[in-house]
Image (spheres, rainbow, N blue to C red):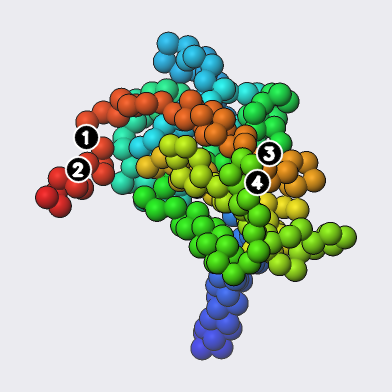
Amino acid sequence: MFEWIRPRFMLVLIATLGACTKPEDPSDRTARETQRNLELSQIRLDPARCPGGGDGMLYVALGELVMRVPNFSAPGLRGPVYSGAEKLPRPPMPDAPEGCKQHPARAQVLHLSLLVAQSPDHIAAPLRAIGVYRSDGRAHMQEVNEGAFDRARARSDCMTSPSGLTICGRREEGLRVATGMQVAGGNVAGGPRWVAACGFGSGSILVDDCTVYYRLRKHMLVKYLFNQQQVSLERMFELDPAIRDWLNSLVVENYPWPGPSMSKQTSSKER
């Protein structure tokens, strides 16, 4: 009798264990990751909880570079830091709420479109989107855009406007979806060259969508998007110096990180 019960019991046990280890539904895993990313991308700060009551501002760290922006009721939006956080500098007060001056919120990207939208007369109002990115020292996409501009200038008929902007390629009139690229470039005093890529190769398939990348500071890359139906290439080129001044004004110069930064420690070890 017991010899008959044992195999039957084992079959039931195996079936039970099999049910417990059922592979996770990919859609459930995707939904969970999407929710996690959404939560991590939002910076929610009650300034009243900051030491001393805060100053009504939101502090965000792109590596060692700290930016200070108005804190709205809507959460600040960022690209989270998923890896390498242990190499970033330690905030002065890690126990303070994230986003306080004493504990800047870590980010790979800080999206500023909401900030621009709060001020309709803002200098960057014509932009469809703008964000600043933590830089590893190179301006990869700026190099890509500049390479495309230099190649187009070497092989195409280009025109130079009175403002000093050189435009290569023509807008494809009557088409909504681009079949080619239009590029424009010009020098900006005291900063990297301004280059816009429009249409195919700009990150969009629409004829009038344009993207600009450049490294504004050692640890800050800038990316913004605009559409030629709302603002011309020439006008955007003329506005860009003011946008650079605005972005620089958001930087907390010489933020008081406690002790030497990780990059300085690393460089001293290398020496």
In the rendered view, does 263 fall on the left or right side of 80? left
Alpha-carbon span between mark 2 and mark 3: 44 Å
Observer-side mark, 4 or 1, equals 4
Q: Earlier in the sequence, mark 2 or mark 4?
A: 4
Observer-nearest of 5 and 19: 19
Instruction: Kindly report the distance in space between the C-alpha atoms of the residues bearing marks 2 and 4.
Output: 48 Å
Above or below 159: residue 131: above
Q: Tell me which label, 1 or 3, sits earlier in the chain.
A: 3
Identity of the amino acid at label 2?
Gln
Crowding at label 3, few (<14), some or many (≥20) Cα neighbours within 10 Å? few
Is 230 left, or right, of 77 in this rendering?
A: right
- The residue mark sitting in front, 4 or 3, is 4
Residue 265 horizontal/vertical position (percent): 19, 43
Q: Are marks 1 and 3 in contact (CB under 8 Å)?
A: no
- Depth check, mark 1 against mark 3: the one in front is 3
Circle nearer the N terminus (4, 3): 4
Q: Amino acid at mark 3?
A: Arg
- Label 1 to label 3, Cα distance in Å? 43 Å
Query: Of callouts 4 and 1, which one flags the residue occurring earlier in the amino acid sequence?
Result: 4
Q: Amino acid at mark 1?
A: Pro
Mark sitting on residue 265? 2
Spatial CA span between label 4 and label 3 = 11 Å
Q: Find out whether the residues at labels 4 and 1 contact each other: C-beta distance under 8 Å.
A: no
Say which residue label 4 marks.
161
Q: Nearer the viewer, mark 2 or mark 4?
A: 4
User: In the rendered view, does 20 fall on the left or right side of 219?
Assistant: right
Q: Is disc 2 in contact with disc 1, using a CB cutoff of under 8 Å?
A: yes
Residue at (84, 59) in percent of width and height: 173
The residue wearing badge 1 is 260
Under mark 4, the amino acid is: Ser
Which residue in the protein does label 3 denote?
A: 235
